[in-house]
Image (cartoon, rainbow, N blue to C red):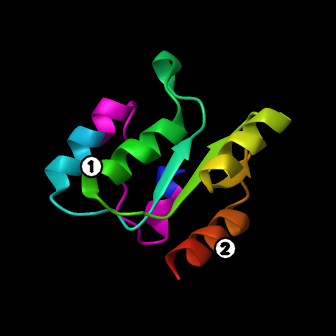
Amino acid sequence: MAQLLEKWGCDVAKTISISDALERIGALGGTPDAIIADLHLDSDESGLEAVNAIRQQVKSEIPAMIVTADYSVDAAREAAVYGFELLKKPVKPAEMRSLLSFLLA
């Protein structure tokens, strides 16, 4: 996914956990244009929690999308409660590009 985004001209900061994301965002010294997070992260962390933590740190409602292989109703409901767009794996590049363009507009 990172390679695809970079091919589109995006600067990508890959992270593996909430603490890693917060540290990386702090080191960037700016606010990301968008966040793409997997729903289920390692160590029982959630992409939903990661997005919220990043938003709190930078004090901005950064546009975000959640990517998941979880096709359950619960996953869709959880993303909707937070107001996040949900893309299901395998992600179709055209679908991701369209959603990213929409979020950034």
Q: Position of residue 9 (x, y in %)?
A: 41, 72
The residue lying at 40 percent from left, 32 percent from top is 16
Checking the image for residue 57, the label placed there is 1
User: In the image, residue 92 lies at what x, y percent?
Assistant: 73, 58
N-terminal of the pair, mark 1 or mark 2, is 1
Note whether residue 71 is visible. no
| Residue 73: x %, y % from top left | 84, 37
Residue drawn at x 37%, y 42% is 53
Viewed as shown, does residue 15 lie left or right of 2?
left
Report the span colored magenta.
4-21
- Disc 2 packing (10 Å; few <14; some 14–19; many ≥20): few
The image shows residue 3 at horizontal and vertical percentages of 48, 54
Q: Is residue 12 visible?
A: yes
Residue drawn at the location 71% of the way across and 69% of the way down: 94
Foreground residue among 10 and 54: 54
**Mark 1 packing: few (<14 Cα in 10 Å), some, or many (20+)?**
few
Amino acid type of the residue that numbered disc 2 sits on in the rendered structure: Ser
Q: CA distance from mark 1 to mark 2?
A: 27 Å
The image quadrant that residue 101 belongs to is bottom right
Up-down: is 59 above or below 42?
below
Numbered label attached to residue 74:
none
Tag 2 residue: 98
Check the image and name the residue furthest to the top: 43
